Image: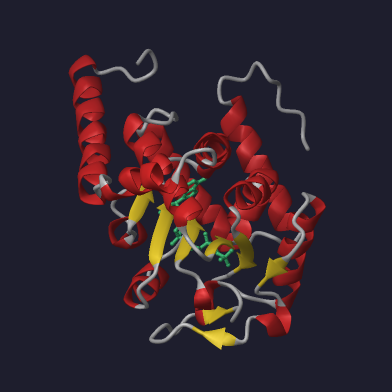
């Protein structure tokens, strides 16, 4: 990695860019993933690059739901594998979920490269690679339709960190719970998910691992209460309101950096 001085005011952001670029060089991330990352960065800037209470609330409900699910699956794409490979494996372990590679720009080489990086980080099994992706999500025409018959096809809950468009709707039509992690609260995925975590995957996934360790000890009744009192419309509204209020405050002052 090129030498980014830790004292640089945008150190963390530059570090994440490096992870994405490295992921591209290793055949994990596609070029379009760099564009997606830039869109995420823009939303993160507006959100103040921190985890807000609405995201914490969504994460708690998401973790409780995964712990309650019979067959939870975490869907992994190129950007997620490049940004948080270790944390995503730890989360799967902590909530008892399977890991499945699911790509919009699917190639055999990328499937294998992503499975390899997850295994390097301790994953025991990675679904959705090669002939394992033999089932199909109905009414979905992108490469994302190809899923594992032991994974997403039969899952009751699917976590989709950093997703595009139409798959969330198709999974919901199949009766599945969909948890999205997306910095853009206006995206189709964010709007269509059962639970939307408006936060950066690099902050959300490690936080969810901590929550899973805490919630694992609770009884089902308590987990069910967390899930049933959760309202995604309200939480999305809070995210959008926070953006509006923050921009209003900033526009009154005319400055950004000190806030
Ligand atoms: O690896 P593949 O082939 O499955 O392709 C993955 C990409 C990301 C290229 C594909 O899914 C895509 O084109 O996604 P979109 O339509 O650009 O959507 C990505 C969404 O994720 C956008 O709403 C971004 O704001 C958001 N996003 C980007 N980076 C992050 C993020 N959300 C959370 N954390 C991030 N780090």
Residue 186 position within the rendered picture, expressed as x and y whole percent measured from the top left: 28, 52
Residue 3 position within the rendered picture, expressed as x and y whole percent measured from the top left: 77, 29
**What is the quadrant of the N terminus in the image?**
top right
Which residue is painted at 72% across and 80% down in the image? 130
Q: Residue 186 vs residue 132: left or right?
A: left
Front-most of 27 and 90?
Answer: 90
Above or below, 152 relative to 6? below
Q: Residue 56 vs residue 155: left or right?
A: left
Above or below, 126 relative to 246? below
Residue 4, can we see it?
yes
Tell how many labels: 0
Front-most of 186 and 18?
Answer: 186
Q: Quadrant of residue 202?
A: top right
Residue 27 position within the rendered picture, expressed as x and y whole percent measured from the top left: 73, 62
Q: Quadrant of residue 244?
A: top left
What colouring does the structure picture have?
Answer: secondary structure
Which residue is painted at 30% across and 62% down in the image? 192
Residue 184, can we see it?
no
Front-most of 211 and 107?
Answer: 211
**What is the quadrant of the C terminus in the image?**
top left
Which residue is painted at 34% across and 30% down in the image? 53
Residue 208 position within the rendered picture, expressed as x and y whole percent measured from the top left: 52, 40
């Amino acid at each position: 990695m090129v030498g980014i001085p830790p004292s640089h005011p945008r150190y963390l952001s530059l570090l994440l860019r490096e992870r994405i670029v490295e992921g591209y060089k290793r055949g994990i991330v596609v070029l379009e993933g760099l564009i997606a990352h830039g869109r995420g960065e823009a939303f993160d800037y507006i959100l103040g690059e921190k985890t807000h209470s609405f995201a914490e609330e969504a994460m708690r409900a998401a973790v409780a739901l995964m712990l309650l699910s019979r067959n939870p699956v975490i869907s992994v794409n190129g950007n997620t594998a490049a940004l948080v490979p270790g944390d995503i494996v730890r989360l799967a372990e902590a909530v008892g979920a399977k890991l499945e590679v699911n790509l919009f720009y699917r190639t055999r080489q990328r499937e294998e490269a992503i499975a390899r990086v997850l295994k390097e980080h301790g994953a025991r099994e990675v679904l959705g690679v090669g002939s394992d992706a033999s089932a199909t999500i109905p009414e979905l025409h992108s490469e994302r339709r190809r899923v594992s018959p032991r994974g997403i096809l039969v899952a009751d809950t699917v976590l989709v960190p950093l997703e595009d468009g139409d798959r969330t709707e198709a999974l919901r039509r199949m009766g599945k719970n969909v948890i999205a992690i997306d910095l853009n609260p206006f995206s189709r995925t964010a709007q269509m998910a059962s639970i939307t975590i408006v936060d950066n995957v690099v902050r959300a996934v490690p936080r969810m691992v901590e929550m899973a360790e805490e919630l694992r000890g609770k009884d089902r009744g308590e987990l069910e209460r967390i899930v049933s009192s959760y309202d995604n419309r309200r939480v999305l509204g809070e995210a959008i309101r926070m953006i509006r209020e923050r921009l209003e405050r900033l526009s009154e002052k005319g400055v950004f950096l000190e806030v």
